[in-house]
Each structure stands twice: as structure tokens, then as C-alpha cells.
Image (cartoon, rainbow, N blue to C red):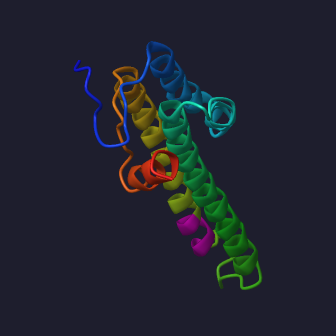
Amino acid sequence: MSSLAPGPGLYVPTQDEKTFALLVYVLGIFSGFIAPLIFFLVKRDSKFVAFHALQSLTWHIIYMVALIGGIIIAFLSLFASMGFPPGDHAKPPLAFFGIFGIVWLIGAGGGIVNLILGIVYAIKSHNGEWAEFPLIGGWVLRKVVYK
């Protein structure tokens, strides 16, 4: 690894910073947004750890909002379809099960994406990389490093 800074405003992190950034992602797999939030609040003095913690925290919040929003929409569709039963009462409400399937896919797919992102970015952060998540990493980098 080079001793030069990776880019303007960025620096080569210490071994402790690399370890804390690794823990942000590994613990985030199991605890959701709680571990990244704790690391972000406790290690704000380290831009490297704060960047990785805020990046992971942002991902977990987006995933949680999408999942909770989908669950709310699924239950609203269930209650709405109960007011208009089909002619054949033996059939389940199609609107609920269609939306429920989409919500289930968001939950399962998000869980798999969470696992993959956690492992890949834990390795990258432990190697000292300022690796950005797709779509949100650039925004987080500007907020933490270039503020």
C-alpha cells in the first residue's frame, strides 16, 4: 500500500480506524442500523470511520423505510380488499397477496444485499479503501470529508 493519500481530502487510515470500519459493516449485518449509528456517534473524530458508519447507516435506513413502507401498503391493501369481497368467497384477496409477495421479495432481497454489502465493504474498509456504496457513497463522502 502506498503512503500517499488516496485522493484530495482523503488520507491513509490507521490500523485502528480500519478495524473500527470493519466492525461497522460486520456488526451492521446482525444489528441493522444500531451498530453503524453507535460507531458514527462515538468515532466522529475519525473521518474514515465516520464515512463508513454513515454510509452503512444510510443504507440500513433506506432498507428499513422501504420494508416498513411496503408492510404498511400490504396491510392497507388487505383491509381495502376486505371491504370488497370477490364473488367466490373461497378465493384469497389477490391485491393483498400480490403486494405481500413484492414486500417479501424486498425483505428477502434486501437481506441478501445487506449481507453482500456488509462482507464486501468490510473487506474493503479493512484494506483502508474509501470505497463508496453505489448511489449513496458519493453523497456520504461529501458530507463527512468535504463538509
Residue 102, horizontal then vertical, whole percent: 51, 61
Seen in the picture, residue 68 relative to 133 is either above or below; the reply is below
Q: Give yes or no for residue 106 being in the magenta stretch.
A: no
Q: Residue at x 37, y 44 (%)?
A: 132
Seen in the picture, residue 72 relative to 50 is either above or below; the reply is below
Q: Residue furthest left?
A: 2
Name the residue nearer the viewer: 93 or 121: 121
Seen in the picture, residue 94 relative to 19 is either above or below; the reply is below
Name the residue nearer the viewer: 57 or 93: 57
Residue 111, horizontal then vertical, whole percent: 51, 41
Name the residue nearer the viewer: 120 or 50: 50
Q: Residue furthest top?
A: 15
Q: Residue at x 66, y 58 (%)?
A: 68
Q: Quadrant of the N terminus?
A: top left
Residue 80, horizontal then vertical, whole percent: 72, 80
- The quadrant where residue 27 appears: top right
- Answer with left or right where residue 39 lies relative to residue 25: right
Q: Which residues are magenta?
A: 94-99
**Main secondary structure type of the part rendered in magenta:** helix
Seen in the picture, residue 105 relative to 13 is either above or below; the reply is below
- The quadrant where residue 89 appears: bottom right
Q: Residue at x 49, y 21 (%)?
A: 17
Residue 87, horizontal then vertical, whole percent: 65, 85
Name the residue nearer the viewer: 40 or 33: 40
